[in-house]
Amino acid sequence: MNYAPIIIFVYNRADHFIQTYSALASCKEAKESELFIFSDGPKNEAGKEKVNEVRAAVAAIKNNGDFKTVTVTESPVNKGLAASVIAGVTQIINKYGKVIVVEDDCKVSPFFLSFMNNALEFYKDNHKIGSIAGYTPMINLPSDYSNDVFAAYRSCSCTWACWSDRWKGVDWELKYIKDFYKSPKLIRRLNSNGSDRFMRLYRQTKGNGSSWSVRFGAHLVKNNLLTVYPRYSYITNIGCDESGVHSTSDDAEKMRVDLSKSIENPVLSDIEIDSRIQKILKRHYSYGFISEIKKFIATALIVVKERLKG
């Protein structure tokens, strides 16, 4: 198999990176995979020490033979997570046609690379599928659901994979946001796996957010593309100290899973949306009924306001 290149984006958490790298290197496909590490620069003088600690940790493993090749790119300035991901993924995916991305606080299962590469190959010509997720929250799927994978309209940002034709054309400047204001159907689809999605997308337009994943997820939804999730997660989050961008200790604890359940040889299949699973995911990511109602009302008010503005 032609294994997909892997990207890790690192910043100032050396201990997290070491754990993430070690787990990734334990996958048997690692030695046949090219690894690209993008190291963002410090925000200020006070942040240089931690960034240098990460770069020292990267230098220490670069030539130890765990991967086919290791290529490191160190930014002299701080780009921020969103800009780093957009630029780094675009560079690699344009060259290789596909990519696997891992955040620097994700401990992966030994079967992670096998699943991601097999899924990339299996779904590459299925243009209903926009991305592959490596993470699945601890949810109880319907008792009669027997597939090893399922589909959702919510993309995954911590460990994921994609192809160049799906990544191409993402509107990072959100010029298409008015399409959502005009279409209740699009908003319902966007929020079908969590009532937080539209509100987070809207905040991007007001300069109150810098999430690449919200914009990418909206791109997939607008184009009616699904994300494939494994029945059991292939990663668990190890960033439980509020050290990461866009994360809290509560979020990280909620992301903890039992990696012993990950399936070594999952059966991949052409899947469609299962409305029961969509409701389960929505409950998981909506943080309660009252929160969901508040977001519903806030969304309705935003749509009315933006429509009146024309």
Image: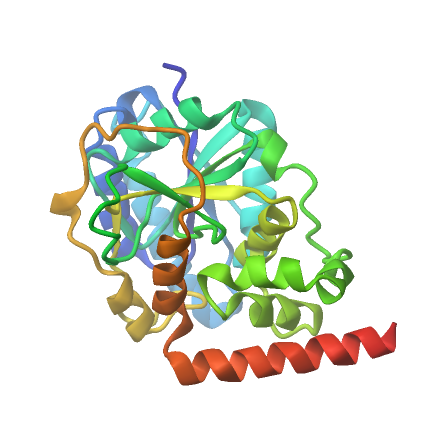
Q: Is residue 239 left or right of residue 222?
A: left
Residue with the most extreme right position: 310
Residue at 44% of width from left, 82% of height from top?
291
Residue with the most extreme top position: 1
Q: Position of residue 158 (x, y in %)?
A: 39, 52
Q: Position of residue 218 (x, y in %)?
A: 60, 54
Q: Is residue 201 left or right of residue 33?
A: right
Vertical order, 255 against 232 (above or below): below
- Is residue 264 visible from the viewing direction of this image? yes
So how many labels did they put on this image? 0
Q: How is the image coloured?
A: rainbow
Q: Nearer the viewer, residue 109 or 14?
A: 109
Q: Is residue 26 left or right of residue 106?
A: left
Q: Position of residue 113 (x, y in %)?
A: 30, 31
Q: Nearer the viewer, residue 134 or 104?
A: 134
Vertical order, 184 against 224 (above or below): below
Q: Position of residue 207 (x, y in %)?
A: 68, 72
Residue 34 lies in quadrant: top left
Q: Nearer the viewer, residue 8 or 122?
A: 122
Residue at 65% of width from left, 70% of height from top?
202
In the rendered image, the quadrant that contains the N terminus is top left
Q: Nearer the viewer, residue 25 or 64?
A: 25
- Is residue 77 visible from the viewing direction of this image? no
In the rendered image, the quadrant that contains the C terminus is bottom right
Residue with the most extreme left position: 260
Residue at 70% of width from left, 74% of height from top?
206
